[in-house]
Image (cartoon, rainbow, N blue to C red):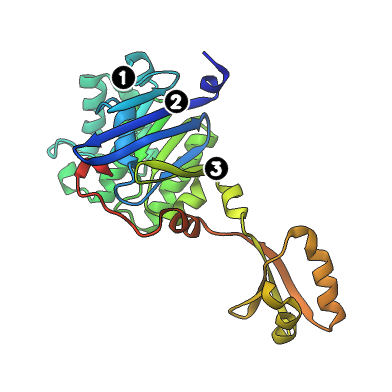
Amino acid sequence: MNAQRETSVIQVSGLTKTYGTVHALAGLDLTIPRGGVYGVLGPNGAGKSTLFRILLGLIRPTSGSATIMGGPVGDVSHMRQTGSMIETPRFPPYLTARQVLRWLALEHGIGKTSDIPYWLERVGLTEAADRRVRGFSVGMLQRLGVAASLMSRPDLVILDEPTSGMDPPGIQEMRALIRSLAADDGVTVVLASHQLLEVQRVCDRVAILNKGRLVREGAVSELTAIGERLRLSVTPIGQALDLLGDKGKLEGEAVLADIKRAEAPALIRALAGKGVDITEARWVGTDLESIFFSETGSIQTVEADHAG
């Protein structure tokens, strides 16, 4: 096993998937490192769900190669180390949440029955454990799906839209769970989500796909630091803007200075020398949403259900 495979959980090379004339994936190259939380982003039709389905052995690629947990896609010994939730999960409606996890353990060999209370508590379903899932909201089904994906205590878990249908407190709880899985349990979490603010909060690294290709990849902290500007709370604002010229921009009651970090001390001295009072100075970066729309442009939706 080469060094890259030892430090990665997923490797994709030249991966292509076509449906007639639709290219869901178009020669995708991607390496997802072991550890932390990794986000796969893209507009509808970018290829996120197609990628996940290929990695989980649910569909075959048209061409290219993919490995997961160091082995070929579909290899049983490696797939046992992987948990997943793709789209809104479906469970027998007449079963309770507790019975669903018991059914998975006894009938499908996924996890141990003794772990059921633990995972129900981790996803916030203890109080609903004995309710039939036919009455569950979409958000509750998502929670149960995440619990099911974790029952085998996997090294890697792949989650498609894990916060779909959740209210703000539920989203916050799921964010905490995902971070805890990575930080405390040593699980590598790979997720897809349209909620870019949540991705920025929870993910260590992201890949942005567009039209089946990788258009941007990197650490969230590094991506959002690109184009960072110095935000200054000053009086008088007009005098500060005059001094900055085309490098200054008004934002609300503050001034954004488009400068490098090394230039900041000289700027602050110059402003003070002109009698400008600075009450706050802090660096602000580009948010992930701005990067996303810069890379993908207008959202292109591919009609085929399996092309997402």
| SS for callout 3 | strand
Task: Identify the mark nearer the N-term, 2 or 3.
Answer: 2
Picture coordinates of residue 76, whole percent (x, y): 32, 15
Alpha-carbon span between mark 2 and mark 3:
22 Å
Picture coordinates of residue 179, whole percent (x, y): 50, 41
Please tell me which residue is depicted at 61% across the width and 59% down the height of the picture: 285
Task: Indicate the quadrant where residue 112 lies.
Answer: top left
3 vs 1, front mark: 3
The kind of residue tagged 2 is Asp
Residue corresponding to mark 2: 155
The kind of residue tagged 3 is Gly
Disc 2 to disc 3: CB gap under 8 Å:
no
Residue corresponding to mark 1: 74
In this rendering, position of residue 305 left or right of residue 262: left
Please tell me which residue is depicted at 45% across the width and 27% down the height of the picture: 11
The kind of residue tagged 1 is Gly
Picture coordinates of residue 226, whole percent (x, y): 61, 54
Q: Is residue 15 above or below residue 306?
A: above
Please tell me which residue is depicted at 58% across the width and 79% down the height of the picture: 252
Disc 3 to disc 1: CB gap under 8 Å:
no
In this rendering, position of residue 308 left or right of residue 8: left
**Could you tell me which quadrant the C terminus lies in?**
top left
Q: Closer to the camera, 287 or 139?
A: 287
Residue corresponding to mark 3: 218
